[in-house]
Structure formats: structure tokens, C-alpha cells
Amino acid sequence: MSLATATLDKAPEESVAARVRSALETVFDAVAATRADTTALLERVAAEGRRPATVDLAALRPGLHLRLARHELMSGVGFVAAPGLLSDVPAWLEWWQSGPEGDVRPLLLDLDPEHSAYADYTHWDWFALPRDSGERAVAGPYVDYLCSDEYSLTLSAPVHVEGRFAGVAAADVYLRHFEAAVMPMLRRLPGPARLVNARGRVAASTDPRHLVGSLSKGPEFARALASGRPGHTEGVRLVPCDGVPLVLVTAAVTTGTARKY
Amino acid sequence: MKQQHINGGARRAVFAPVDSRARVDTVVRRIGDAIELGLLADGEQLPGESELAGQLGVSTVTLREALMALRQQGLVTTRRGRGGGSFVSLPEVPGEERLKVRLRGWSTEELRDLGDHWAALSGTAARLAAERTEPEDLVQLRRTADELGRATGAAARSRVYGRFHVELAAAAQSARLTREQVALQTEVGAMLCLVLGDDEYREEVADRHHSVISAVQDGAHESARELAERCVQESTARLIALRLTL
């Protein structure tokens, strides 16, 4: 269904939720392409009967650079290896970022636990969520003090080779860029609106009482996401951005179908 | 020959403009801290003079003076000719003695001011984190506080201590506070090794961190702020007390 039909058929909130979703789906497309490249690469290496090394991952670079150049919303992209995957290093991020002048550069991290207190990255949501669920995930909003020092969303998907978890393919969206992309959509709504994640953390807002980064407590955002259908609770209307774990929250007005949680 | 070097350096320092002297000290501290913290390894070659000066945003002259000071502290050696350059060298003197030399490079006023800045950052971060987190967001902070309770070696303790404050700033959902805290930890981190070697004090800090987390989890903004400030002030007070004995 095209977005134009969506706008005609649905309540304005549902149309906005669909647009937010398709904005993030373009980033997920880049994650999926990175995942496909990585899987093919690792399978090729496995077929040669050896363990992959950092030098093998260099083959991912042309694809990563192209995706970074093409996607305005994305500021970082790459593959994060599960510890123990590579033969020459204990841990590795094949990670590329857009520089301030539109240049593309690698992220170089000190991942030696003897030197760095940040060597273990396996607890971060962008790594742990896809590893544990086997599904794609959106982490954040969170302050990314490992890679970019930016307030970010990270979209990621697990990479499996021969049935084993090998790491995650991922892409970073800085919150300021996400805001620039979704604010025009939110502003089209008649009243104040905000996008929150499953835990109620605000990712974008046209409501000065609910600032980005704050927590909206009370309503059941996770349940709204699980149901995948619009509903209302405690005076607010919740519209899940079906397919991405964000919920559009507006004042409860009776448009479209509504379900009580 | 060596004596002349020192004399030459010292004489130049006397007549160097104050501002550029401060820049030399900053570079010396920065590179020295990196060596103490193990970010630069023993034997590692530093980038070439002009490249390093460019990266640090200082003139080559300033960088050369800083390298000379680092050579005098025994933290850098310079080899000439092919394959030459400046190399990190950890002298045989115990780390604690070297760190004391570094601490002596700070006046008590500078240490007090550093502590004020740190308390402002961590206090505000704790207050905001109390408003902006739910229990699930605090898992990593808890893990870090536990890790501090187990960490052996002053350098490892200091790294984990610093990470707690960086994670606290991230829990506040503030990229700016986090960046400031990361920068501050690169300054204070090496010196904290001097006070964290003491097991009893390490326990105390771990306890203080746990009580900050509890206040954050309870949404008790003001006590979270106070507890974080007190933790930082206590560390600063210990550094200043030690500085006064040197």
C-alpha cells in the first residue's frame, strides 16, 4: 500500500505512524544489506575451512561506505563481531561513521580489557537484544559513549552463520537527525504528539511537557506494541508504528478504531 | 649534555609566554596520563612531531617542550636516525612514585576546582538520572559498582570508577554531560589510582556508588545529587590531602 492511500484510508495518527515506520525501514534496509553481506562473507570463509580474521571484514567496506553515503538519516553502520568470532582479535567492530564534512571514516576503539574499561560491548542493547531474541531491534534513545558520543537510536539485526550467532549488523541514527525527519510529520497532527519506545522513553515530541529523553510513565507502551493495534489508555491514544518498536502518543480523541487496554 | 638539556628547557620555560607554558603542561599531563593508564603501551611509538602537534592542536615548539618534559619524567625516550622517533617508556620507578610526581604538577586550587567541576557534572547527572530512568536502565551502573568491589590493581579500579560516572551521565540522557565527564575522567583518572589502591577506600567508594544507584532508582532526585556530589568531594579531598604531603 502506498503512503498516499494510507493517508486517505486511515486516521491522521495512523498515517503518521506509518510514515515514521517507513523512515526507519530505510535504515533497516541498510542493516539487512549489511547483514546479508556479512553472512555471505562469513559463510565463504567457513567454506574454506578457516576462521575469519579482521582482514576478511575489509571486504564489507565498499558496501558500508555506499550505504553511509546514500542514507541521510544514518551516521554509522557496520558489523559488530561476537567475541571469539575472529581468529586474530578477541573482539571487533567493523564500524564506519560519517564525518562532519561528509567524509567516511573508521571507528577505532581500544578493546583491550587491560587498557579500556569499555572493552566489553556485549551488554549494550543494540548487541544484546538481537542476540537474545534472534530478531531485529531498535535500541535507544540512549547516549552512545562507546562509538559516537551522540544521543542515538541504533537499529540492529543478528548475523547467524551455520546456526551460530556471529554478531550484529547495525546502523546509528542520531536523535537530532531522527527529529529532523519526523517533526514535520508530527507537526501535521492537530494536537501535541510524541513518539516513545517500549519503555516509554520519548524519542521525538511536539509536546513541551514531554521532552526528548524523558520517561512517560503509566500507560502500557510495551503492550500497545505487542498488540500492534491502536488503542487508548488514561486519556491518551496510542498508535504503534507497526514493525518498529515506537508508539505514537496523542491526546485521546475519538478518531479511527480504538481499543481499551 | 643531559644537564644542559634540562637547563635549556628550564630557561626557555622562564621566558615562555604564560599561555604557551600552560599548553605545554596540558600536553604533558595528557600524554603522561595516557601512559599511566596504559592507553599508550610501553615501547609504543608516538606519531611524528608535526602529526602529533596537529592532532593536539598545538605548535611544534609547544609539543617539543612537552616531549622534553616527558623525557625528563622518564616516560618518553627519543631515538634518532632511521627507525627513530619518540617512544613510550615506562621507567623502573614504581608507578606510585611517578603518579606522585604527576600529582605534584597540580596546585591544591586546581585540584579543588577540578573536584568542583566533577561534582557539578556527577551531581546533576544523578539528579537527572533519578527523573529519567527506570530500574532496567540501571543494570549497567549496578554491574560497574559491583565490578569496582572486585577490581584488583589501582589502575583497573580507577578505570571502573571513571566508567561509573560516565554511565551515570549517560543515564541522565545527556550527551553533553557524558562528553564532559569522559574528558574530565581523562584528567583525573590517573591520579585517582593513588587513592584507590587502598582497599578500605575502594570499598567505601563502591558503597557510595550503590547508594547513588538506590537513590536514582527511588526517584529521589535531591538525595541522588547529594550522594553523588559527596562521593566526588571525598575523592577530591583525599587527593588534596595527599598533595599536601608531597
Image (tube, rainbow, N blue to C red):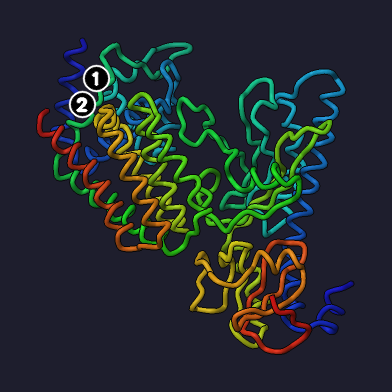
Q: Nearer the viewer, residue A69 or B19?
A: A69
As helix, strand or loop, the secondary structure at mark 2 comes to: helix
* Residue placed under numbered mark 2 in the picture: B100
Is residue A154 in view?
yes
CA neighbours of label 1 inside 10 A, class few (<14), some (14 to 19), many (20+) = some
Q: Position of residue A101 (x, y in %)?
A: 58, 52
Count up the numbered dots: 2
Residue A28, located in which quarter of the rendered image? bottom right
Host chain of mark 2 = B
CA neighbours of label 2 inside 10 A, class few (<14), some (14 to 19), many (20+) = some
Residue at the image position 10 percent from the left and 29 percent from the top? B245
Residue B60 drawn above or below residue A102: above
Kind of residue indicated by mark 2: Lys
Residue A90, located in which quarter of the rendered image? top right
Residue A117 drawn above or below residue B80: below
Q: Locate residue A38 relative to residue A213 in the image: left or right.
A: right
Q: Position of residue B209 (x, y in %)?
A: 35, 45
Residue at the image position 56 percent from the left and 35 percent from the top? A108
Query: What distance separates the C-alpha of mark 1 from that of mark 2?
Result: 15 Å
Kind of residue indicated by mark 1: Gln
Please state, as top left, top right, bottom left or bottom right, where the N terminus of chain A lies in the image.
Answer: bottom right
